[in-house]
Image (cartoon, grey):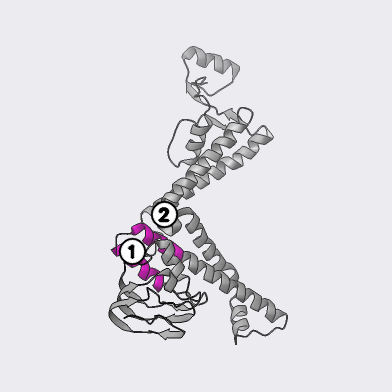
Amino acid sequence: MLLPQTVQGKIDLCRANIANDLTTTGAITLQNCELDLSGAKIGRLCDSEDSWPGPGKLHLDGFEYESIQRAAPTTANARLAWLKRQPEESFQTQPYEQLAAWYHRAGHDSFARDIRIAKERARLRQWLSILSKSYWREVGAKLGIKSKRPGSSAQTASRPWKLYFKEPCKRFWWWVKDIIVGYGYKPHFALIWLAAIWLLGAAVFGHAYPEGMTQSASYKYATPEQNQTDLDNNTQPLGLMLSTNYPAFNPLIYSLDVALPIVDLQQERYWMPNSSVPEGRGLWWFNWFEVLMGWFLASMGIAGATGIIRKD
């Protein structure tokens, strides 16, 4: 199907069934036109950026296509700009999933991941917009300003816990998944964050050494002569003596030992923040922060790599 070169008003192809190509390339201009492809099914999409309708004038919910012409814009960034021509208030997941599925069939898995990440971000933006509008409707209701939507204030007031606590927590979790593992589509992001925490810890502990760090107590088995001396002096446990062999403090290895769960690099067991000085007490809090972040980032990375977080 070939559209005319000059188009004004609205083209309604809602639920159309076109077995071959839908072409909007060449001299065709749809900038001032509204194009409705909702529910349409076509064989191949042949378009160009110059032929796309203006912002808010493209309707793609339910639009299905088997392929996109090679000469058409096929990069993820270009097609995201295409998806953004849809009305902002009518976000739907189907156009994103349709495009991601086509990228996957075409072997462009990285583009497919980018589209699915963009889908989650668009979903979050829509929810934040709805939350903001609901909040101001609530404020307006308290001030005696009537909402344009019938019953909206009553609905908001009837579920304040869900609207202002549960939903924000859920969306915050979405945001965390985005920056840590790209909603599960880019689990290597967790390694980047872990490396940043590791280097930050190395800088902090390295700056604090030696005053802020101290050797932890370590014992080894004592000889009978040493044991008798210790008993006379009442200095340490029976049969043991303080070890004088310590690995040299290395801030890079120490920070890595703290950040990595389970792994023992023989630094954390011999060195610890010195709580007898103010700087050391602050290091204890940072030490626990790095431990918790190490566990969290490792868990998120594993969850992302195994597909637990993804919603394909």
Quarter of image, res 93: bottom left
- Disc number placed over residue 137 in the picture, else none: none
How far apart in space, not on screen, are marks 2 and 1 (Cα)? 17 Å
- Disc number placed over residue 103 in the picture, else none: 1
Q: Which residues are magenta?
A: 94-119
State the image coordinates of residue 83 (x, y, percent, origin top left).
Answer: 44, 70
Q: What residue is at 41 percent from the left and 57 percent from the top?
A: 184
Instruction: Report the front residue among 310 and 261.
Output: 310
Q: Residue pushed farthest top?
A: 225
Mark 1 Cα-neighbour bin, 10 Å: few <14, some 14–19, many ≥20: many
Amino acid marked by disc 2:
Lys
Instruction: Report the front residue among 280 and 75.
Output: 75
Q: Can residue 162 be seen?
A: no
Mark 2 Cα-neighbour bin, 10 Å: few <14, some 14–19, many ≥20: many
Could you tell me which quadrant the C terminus lies in? bottom left
Disc with the residue nearer the chain's start (2 vs 1)? 1
Amino acid marked by disc 1:
Tyr
| SS at badge 2 | loop
Q: Which residue is mark 2?
A: 186
Quarter of image, res 30: bottom left
